[in-house]
Image: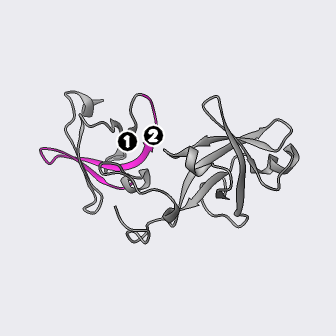
Amino acid sequence: MPDAGGRPGEPSHLVVGHVARAHGTKGEVFVWPLTDQPENVFAEGEAVILGDSEGGMGEDAMTVEVDRARPFKRGLLVGFDGYPDRTAVEPFAGRYLLRPRETLAAPEPGEWYYHELLGLEVETVSGESVGRVREVFELDPTDMLDVVNDAGKSRLIPFAERIVRQVDVAGGRLVIEPPDGLLEL
């Protein structure tokens, strides 16, 4: 795992949630958490950065402090200090929440931030090139890698131990052992 400075091009801030919409009349928003530790990130008194609708630090990015958070359906209802009503938080809808990379826990061994997987060259254990990771989709029961080859053909590869044999972020490659038929889809 690179340090907070990271590899060249490593982001200084990471997305931790997405504000879907305002909820109720008391200044809460419905947030889809995009972190494995929402209880830490969205704890009372924690600061998050309200970014833009693309997950970046747009011109109107600003720091907001979590006043309260509670589970709701498959996400969280979050209220921010200084934003007492629905009208105050309605402009937050559709924007991403970010945190400085150094404030987040480093991934455990065998875990990676998704942005670290993007662009990795995917090859089979026998050395056959499959393509590059274009996107990572969080799905149940396993996450999926969208891998695109030089001809532009896209394949979804399960990001599962039984298939992914090696992730070498520093070396820029990911090695898979695909079951019969997976690469023919």
Residue stretch rendered in magenta on the structure = 118-140
The colour scheme is one colour
Disc 2, disc 1: CB below 8 Å? Answer: yes
Q: Residue at x 35, y 49 (%)?
A: 111
Q: Quadrant of the N terminus?
A: bottom left
119 sits to left or right of 82: left
Please tell me whether residue 48 is drawn above or below residue 86 in the rendered image: below
Query: Does 134 appear in magenta?
Result: yes
Residue count near mark 1 (Cα–Cα under 10 Å), binned few <14, some 14–19, many ≥20 = many
Q: Position of residue 128 (x, y in %)?
A: 17, 46
Q: Which mark is residue 137?
A: 2
Q: Quadrant of residue 25?
A: top right
What amino acid type is highlighted by mark number 1? Leu
Q: Quadrant of residue 72?
A: top right
Residue at mark 1: 145
C-alpha separation, residue under disc 2 versus residue under disc 1: 6 Å
